[in-house]
Image (cartoon, rainbow, N blue to C red):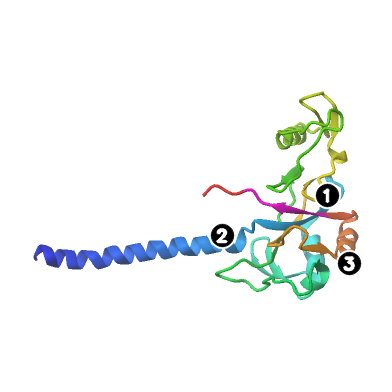
Amino acid sequence: MTVRQNIAIFLPSVVLSFITNHSTKMAQALENVMWQAEFKLYLYPEDPDAPVENAGLKSTLADCKFIGPLIEKNRYQAGEQFLSLLCFMGCSPNIELEPQNDRPYCYIEIPESSAEKRFIAGRNTRKLQCPGCKQTVNNAKALINDAIENKVDFFECPECNQRIDLETINWRKSAFIAKSWIAVGNIYEAEAIPDDKLLGQLELATGNPWKFAYIREEPTAS
């Protein structure tokens, strides 16, 4: 067999391998766009220590048709009453509710409750100012995480040693502390707010009032 014949046999397999690998990477990229929304609306119990039974929570959201069919673990398609239970700002919101392969769409994620409280924050979280010295607490996230890990509900300002109680911090809907939450993917900040009926159903199901926040997720390492 000549060198030219060997090349003729070898090249198609190389091209096929390249196309296969490229297609796989493209599919993975599209899946990440579909599932890992950068902008999310979070709903969470006002009491960060409130125990939430996930099965009952999912049943409540299914009964009021906020969530639809299960797409994959803990992630649901928007239900029939999704647009009624979220109040969108503007006359005709440009959102996608059906699962898509080439663009983001709204989904609901209900992760399992955590045994310990977690501080949920993102790129849009407001800077924390010490109530004592009025200086910006630049390492607030680390200080809050350390306080939670050490099972205390406060930390001290690095500049003036002022005690800052976690429950007194007003994040203006840009962060929160909780063991349980619901995330609605692909909702921009202030694009939609939960209807009182939805918040009322959550309170009825859990025995605790619920609040909401908008989080722009931190970029993940590729």
Residue that carries the numbered disc 3 in the rendered image: 197
The one of 193 and 15 positioned closer to us in this rendering: 193
The one of 30 and 123 positioned closer to us in this rendering: 123
Residue at 49%, 64% in the rendered image: 27
Q: Amino acid at mark 3?
A: Lys
Residue at 86%, 55% in the rendered image: 210
- Give the label on residue 51, or none: 1
Q: How far apart, in angstroms, are the residues tagged by discs 3 and 2?
A: 32 Å
Earlier in the chain: of badge 1 and badge 3, it is: 1
- Give the label on residue 122, or none: none
Q: Quadrant of residue 200?
A: bottom right
Residue at 23%, 65% in the rendered image: 11
Q: Does 27 lie within the magenta span?
A: no
Q: From which residue to which does the magenta span run?
A: 212-218
Q: Amino acid at mark 2?
A: Asn
Q: Are marks 1 and 3 in contact (CB under 8 Å)?
A: no
Q: How far apart, in angstroms, are the residues tagged by discs 1 and 3?
A: 21 Å
- Give the label on residue 32, or none: 2
Residue at 90%, 54% in the rendered image: 209
Please say whether residue 115 is visible from this viewpoint. Answer: no
Query: Mark 2: which secondary structure?
Result: helix
